[in-house]
Image (tube, helix red, strand yellow):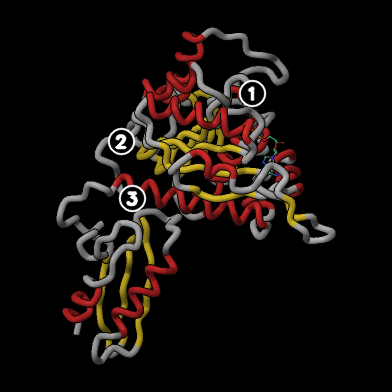
Amino acid sequence: MRDAVWTALKTVNDPELHRDLVSLGMIEHAEVEGNVAHVKVNLTTPACPLKGQIEGDVRAAVLAVPGIQDVVVTFGAMVRPPAQPALPGVKYVLLVGSGKGGVGKSSVAVNLAVSLARDGARVGLLDADVYGPSVAHMMGQGGARVTANAERKMQPIEAHGVRFLSMANLSPAGQALVWRGPMLHSAIQQFLKDAAWGDLDYLIVDLPPGTGDVQLSLTQTVHVTGAVLVTTPQDVALIDAARALDMFRKASVPVLGVVENMSYFVAPDTGLTYDIFGRGGSRKLGNLPLLGEVPLDVEARQDADRGLPAVLAHPQSPAAAALTQIARNLAGRVSVQALAHLPEQLPVV
Ligand SMILES: Nc1ncnc2c1ncn2[C@@H]1O[C@H](COP(=O)(O)OP(=O)(O)OP(=O)(O)O)[C@@H](O)[C@H]1O
């Protein structure tokens, strides 16, 4: 019966990778006790967006095996290392960029990082928005100071399950940075290479808005896995987003998808929906996967101001639910991209 269960599992495909779970090395074990099958599936990311579907497909396939009365499906997860790690110990570097300022790029970066960590991934967050570093405040750590460890490396600050570094925790509050390109380049290098990030599945990088020195520095310093483009749906934002898209393409950074922020607003008193900036506008950016639409949300803004990311403070709110799903969709896209060129048979992890 055990063999029949394995044969049944070979008919279940990962919905995104379009290959069966056995050849993908995702079945950690499949045993039969009496008439109950116990199957452990090792996902390619703890933030798997299709866990429910995989569970349903496994159950259906195994229950079809004659003699099996019940199936217990458990899950583990290990983010597979890419062929080329981004940095020593860091599997994937994901840039969060925008064309225009103020479209919610930092809010998205913070909530993506916290959401992936909540799902069980090891996550770092680098605030590379050196001119307007807001990540520290949004993480509730505006007053914290970065220290050096025994090896004289910068020690990331830990908050909400995420390790992060921001210029805001290095320079005195309220002081402007007046830096030229080469200084910025070395600051970014230090943040990436002279910091004790430890082992990370994902390092999320909040870029400054627009197309400039920092973006270039980053793509020259590490192997970037991909970028997420945040935009609001109105034409003036989309024009700048298209420019950012072009920059990523020229730097050979794959754009993993678009987040449409401030997509719509649901009035709390009437429940009526208002498309203030023109919902769905980000589809004009062409054939990019839409990772999700985040509504305008007063609570999410208040949460950001008091340093508690919305996915933690109000996880059930529509904005937080959208951000959680976006984080999972992104993790799914990273797995797909990383595992796109698979050998025929992968070892079980
Ligand atoms: N969906 C949303 N609903 C309500 N407020 C939001 C939403 N997204 C972002 N905000 C608020 O809008 C403001 C700007 O957001 P944020 O700082 O994330 O933008 P940004 O694109 O990173 O800006 P910058 O150009 O400074 O880098 C913040 O006060 C944030 O809390």
Residue sitting at x 49%, y 19%: 214
| Image quadrant occupied by the C terminus | bottom left
Q: Secondary structure at mark 2?
A: loop
Q: Amino acid at mark 3?
A: Val
- Can you give x and y, in whole percent of width and height, for residue 300 in the image? 70, 47
- Can you give x and y, in whole percent of width and height, for residue 219 in the image? 39, 24
Quickly name the residue at label 3: 336
Residue sitting at x 50%, y 48%: 290
Quickly name the residue at label 2: 85
Precedes in sequence: disc 1 or disc 2: 2
| Image quadrant occupied by the N terminus | bottom left
Q: Secondary structure at mark 3?
A: helix
Decide which of 28, 227 is in the foreground and name it: 227
Which image quadrant for residue 43? bottom left
Decide which of 228, 314 is in the foreground and name it: 228
Q: Is mark 1 within 8 Å of ligand 1?
A: yes
Q: Amino acid at mark 2?
A: Pro
Q: Residues within 10 Å of mark 2 (few under 14, many from 20)?
A: some
Precedes in sequence: disc 3 or disc 1: 1
Q: Secondary structure at mark 1?
A: loop
Quickly name the residue at label 1: 132
- Can you give x and y, in whole percent of width and height, for residue 315 in the image? 64, 57
Q: Nearer the viewer, mark 1 or mark 2?
A: 1
Residue 112 seen in render: yes
- Can you give x and y, in whole percent of width and height, for residue 211 in the image? 51, 21
Cα–Cα gap, marks 3 and 2 = 16 Å
Q: Amino acid at mark 1?
A: Gly
